Amino acid sequence: MDFTGRDVITIKELSKKDINSILTTAQKLVPYARGDKYTDLLKGKIMASLFFEPSTRTRLSFDSAMNRLSGRIIGFSDPGGTSLKKGETLADTIRMADAYSDIIVIRHPLEGSARLAAEFAESPIINAGDGAGQHPTQCLLDLFTIKTEKKKLEGNNVVLLGDLKYGRTVHSLAYALSLYGSQLTFVSPKELKMPKEVIEECKSFGIEPTSTTNLEKAIKEADVLYTTRIQKERFPDPEEYKKVVGSYTVDKTLLKHAPKDMIIMHPLPRVTEIHPEVDNTPQAIYFKQAFNGVPVRMALLSMALGGKL
Ligand code: NCD
């Protein structure tokens, strides 16, 4: 399959074949991601990393991925130091990054920003999160993690917990898990329910997600519990945030209701949703999940830039 030059704006543009191929490539790249093997696959290539919003894992794992492939990186993590401060448009900023690099990774607070960027750039654009919209590369690493840990992607019983309204990771993941025929349960405070459009997308694959506020019951037969942070920064009214903050916590008491082999995932950062006492349980795989961002992003960068291992 030739992926050269492709943009990755939403997970919906990727077919099952595309996703399977990215995950297979990522699997091969694990020893390189760990630094146990060396490759100069992307030597001479430049990745522009444009982060208009805070990030730890996504930005650093993209940087690590490009470095592990022997490519180079330009960019910023604080748009305050760029000509945006002088009133430059996003379109012109993208045109410049396009002129100076071979591939552009962008994170921006506005939904639709990555799509806009793709209109102004010749180089491939990778969406590293656009507001409450989509987060396709997180979705790919989440799928990679489920596949690695549960030995299959098809037919898992997955509970998505937390801020399902503003959380972009769960918007992408609910779609992708439906594509792979998962059984989905959405658990959230009633103010933070999964948007109707996402539920409709799941249904288009013949999936009937269940929505509930009863977490204990939801995890009884779960293979995966995917926890998310309440997206404080996306609430138009701080009073609304105060109503829901702290409304759920995954702790050892809760885990008594879950199967022993249920895995606990989280895109991170976590605030209070997972008690630190859970970190040393075998079910907690969120730090492993964060590492998986490196081989998965290496796979995407190398495939979009036409590199072959
Ligand atoms: C997520 C994001 O930015 O959407 N983080 C990440 O990329 N790993 C989740 C979050 O911020 O809560």
Image: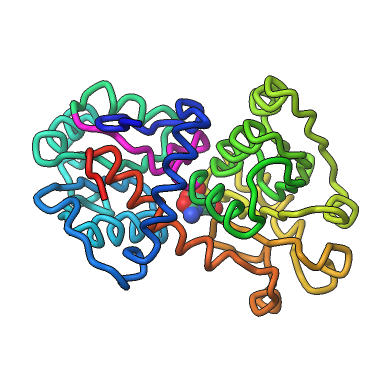
**In this picture, is 129 found above or below 246?**
above
Check the image and report above or below for 219 versus 3. Answer: below
Report the side of 190 relative to 111 (left or right). right
Q: Is residue 126 above or below residue 6?
A: below
Instruction: Name the residue at 70% across, 76% down.
Output: 281
167 in the magenta segment? no
Q: Which residues are magenta?
A: 123-138
**Nearer to the camera, 97 or 86:** 97
> Residue 168 falls in which quadrant of the image?
top right
Q: Residue drawn 49% across and 51% down?
A: 141
Residue 67: image quadrant is bottom left
Q: Quadrant of the N terminus?
A: top left
- Look at 32% across and 73% down and name the residue there: 36
Q: Where does the image place residue 21, in percent across and percent down from the top left?
A: 43, 40
Q: Residue at x 90, y 53 (%)?
A: 217
**Residue 144 location, x and y as percent?**
53, 51
Q: How many marks?
A: 0
162 up-or-down from 181: above or below? below
Give residue 17's position: percent from left, percent from top.
Answer: 48, 31
Q: How far from the left and from the top, in percent, is residue 295?
A: 39, 56
Q: Is residue 277 left or right of residue 296?
A: right
Name the colour scheme: rainbow
Residue sitting nearer the eye, 264 or 119: 264
Left or right: where 162 falls relative to 120: right
* Between 281 and 107, the one nearer to me in the picture: 281
